Amino acid sequence: MKKLLCLILFLVACKPADNNFINGYIEGEYVYIAPAVGGMLDEVNVVKGQQVTVGDKLFAVDKEIWQANLQKAENNVEAATEQQKASVAVLINAEKEYNSAKSLVKNKTVSEANYDSKLANYESAKAKAAELKALTAKAEQNLLQVKRQYEQNIATSKVSGIVNDVYFRLGEFVTSGNPIVSILPPENVKIRFFVNERTLPQIKYNQQIKVNCDGCREELKAKVSYISPSAEYTPPVIYSNESRDKLVFMVEATFANTSEVLPVGLPVSVRIK
């Protein structure tokens, strides 16, 4: 019996290690939403950990002020458009009178003075129409700019995902470009692991890999999305089976099914074959 036990232990000890399993961890790339212009935080419509979808309201900064600015910009476009339409009508009429006078002056039916007057009216109407067209375009451009600022200060989500954090409270003053909310879309969750130079040739871009964790019921499918072109120093030993190697290459992969993503920071095991 002792001989059999010794033989089993010997065979186990001699079995080569499976180098196809690599330790890694889950990383996420967050989307940070900030106001375009600073002001008072009037509304906070989400909380940490909340699931949001595209179009959900996130926050509002100086809401009443930006609503007033937007209304003013819309009114300016409406007024400029009406003036442009009126100028076009005047131009059409002036052009008709000019063309009529041009044909009649050849037959000496109208005087040169009358023709000159119709020509001057036509040129003036044409210049006025061009000026008002430019003013309308300028008003429309300003409206687009105000709308962009309004949408950034009365913010709605452009992505679906989990609210990672809310950095300010209602009533606080926030500055331009300073994130108020961060969101983690499931497609931005990735697996990150490190391989040495011996393992690197086995990994290709878009290669299918398998991912497992202590609480996972089964392996999850993923695909290699990035391979670092340069080496770096070995990461903490908790994330590396090959801590004796001085330099490693970082590899990232994305989940094949975004509904199966794992929590950020979770240690995982990656099987590359």
Image (tube, helix red, strand yellow):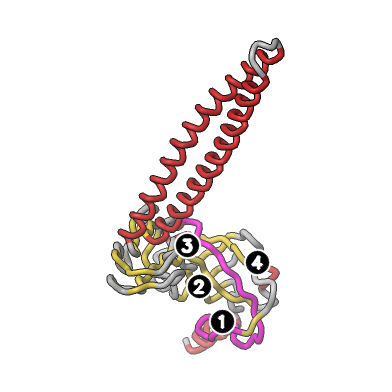
Image point (67%, 68%), residue name: 202
Which residue corresponds to mark 1? 241
Indicate the position of residue 70 as horizontal and vertical percent values: 38, 52
Indicate the position of residue 239 as horizontal and vertical percent values: 52, 80
The reply, left or right, for residue 64 in relation to residue 145 is: left
Q: Which tag, 4 or 1, sits closer to the chain's start?
A: 4
Q: Secondary structure at mark 2?
A: strand
Indicate the position of residue 101 as horizontal and vertical percent values: 63, 17
Which residue corresponds to mark 2? 269
Image point (59%, 86%), residue name: 243
**How far is disc 2 from disc 4 in space, using C-alphas?**
15 Å
- In the image, the segment drawn in magenta is 234-257
Q: Secondary structure at mark 1?
A: loop
**How far is disc 3 from disc 1 in space, using C-alphas?**
20 Å
- Residue 220's tag is 3
Q: Which tag, 2 or 3, sits closer to the chain's start?
A: 3
